Amino acid sequence: MAWIWTALTGILFLYVIQELLTQIFKKKKKQPPSPNGLPILGHLHLIGKNPHQDLNRLSQKHGPIMYIRFGSVPTYVLSSPAGAELILKTHDAVFASRPPHEASKYICHEQRNITFGRYGPYWRDMRKLCTLELLSGHKISQFQAMRKSEIGLFVLSLKESAEKHETVDVSKRVAGLSADMVCLMVFGRKYEDKDFDENGFKAVVTETLELGAVLNLGEYFPVLGLLDVQGLTRRMKRLGKIFDVFLEKIIDDHVEKKQEKKQTLDFVDTMMGIMASGKAGFEFDRRHVKAVLVDMIVAGMDTSATVIEWAMSELIRHPQVMKKLQKELETVVGLDHMVEESHLESLGYLEMVVKETMRIHPVAPLLLPHESMEDCVIDGYHIPKNSRVIVNTYAIGRDPKVWPNPEKFSPDRFLDNNVDMKGRDFRLLPFGSGRRGCPGMQLGLIVVRLVIAQLVHCFDWELPDGMLASDLDMEDHFGSVTCRNTHLLANPTYRLQK
């Protein structure tokens, strides 16, 4: 037991030194407002299971630029469009890196993925490669037939449930559709749970997302990280091994079958071809391929499905909005046809519904943390090198100074303005902005728009067992992807004339 007391004494000593240095620093440099903190813990005691909501409440008291400390880690929270623009545009080059991330270290081969990769030459080269070879408009269009086929099967399955008057688990069905489409694009085939791990494909991805967002005390108190008091390192290593075994098998299968003719190369084919040719121009081996594949699986499966889930929840709660969207679809598409991707550009009200969903239910309400690569002054406040910076899009989306009546779901608020959701307007940042903006934005928007349009055009929806719209649980569950706290259940009625 003596070593535990030695460790705790060491932590206390380091904290005292840190506090003394911090006080000296504060006298010399202007710091943003900050809540009262505790010794050692800093402000960890103020953060509960929904950090985006807790930080929003704190920012309402302490201001849109706020300093907090998580253990030994200084963190700055930006909760206004002006603050977000300073971080993501004006000083984008300073804040383009990510802090150390233990889950990515063990699951994505020492943070070699795009999502959490540290900023530098490797990250720039890898992002460019992924943007040009995997997520370009041309590559996305090659999978259009696949998307049409999978969504057609999805609608047929829902139609069968409607004919049987079954209650549908919309959350589960949409998640399954998303997983199938991601697997087909990335691997060239669908995978069942038994092909992946005894716990199931979805369970492993869900656990990965949870570990990516969990409050990891080891990152804020290094000594506790060595002790692994939460057992997180053990879980991360286990997940890393599961992904590694699965992806090695997939890569081997693709290498063995590389002579087979394919109409469309999947992501593994494309990346292995680049690796074999050496045209990447930088170190690029199986570790890098697997790290990016994990990104594609984890980021691609849940983000789009969660936006669709929230959109359907709000549309069912607001039948007048649902009817207005159905009216647009009837006019543009007609009741004798399903929605095609070619229709999407003509569906202006659908675009407004998607924007409003992403405003009020951001899938990544705190985006992903940034790290300052050098000292910087933001709105007169000094932010030192190696600080963490968080942009709270949840707070921005619910700020009454930015959005009149922000708690109300009202797509019509976008009728007479040009608010953009692709990173150019800092009032709405579902995909982030700047160097670290989401490279899969174009693909994600196509899937989200198409699936929502199909669900609304092909079916009428009612809550089961006489439930009122006001009874629907709209609580969220914070994570790397912030989804509904409970699954959405509803009864579909087929409405097309064919």
Image (spheres, rainbow, N blue to C red):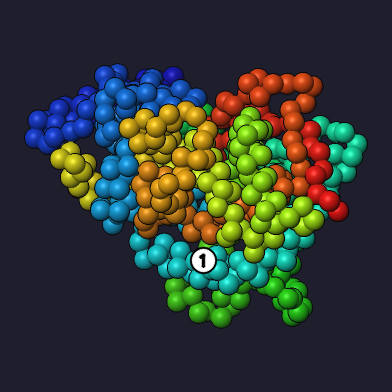
Classify residue 1 by image quadrant.
top left
In x, y percent, where is residue 296?
A: 58, 56
**Spot occupied by residue 222 in the image (x, y as percentages of width and height):** 38, 35
Residue type highlighted by circle 1: Cys
For the residue pair 449 and 38, the one nearer the viewer reads as: 449
Mark 1 residue element: helix
Residue located 26% across and 19% down the image: 36
Q: Which residue is situated farthest in the left direction here?
A: 28
Name the residue: 39% across, 35% down: 403
Where residue 184 appears, x then y in whole percent? 71, 60
**Residue 272 or residue 166, whichever sits in front:** 166
The residue wearing badge 1 is 130
Say which of 47 and 483 sits in front.
483
- The answer to whether residue 239 of the structure is visible from this angle is no
**Total marks placed:** 1
Q: Is residue 105 left or right of residue 55?
A: right
Is residue 202 placed above or below 60 in the rendered structure?
below
Q: Is residue 163 left or right of residue 172?
A: right
User: In the image, what residue occupies the spot 52% across and 46% down?
Assistant: 352
Q: Residue at x 85, y 39 (%)?
A: 162
Task: Say left or right for 307 vs 7.
Answer: right
- The picture places residue 450, in percent across and down from the top left corner, at 65, 54
Q: Is residue 32 in sight in this rendering?
A: yes
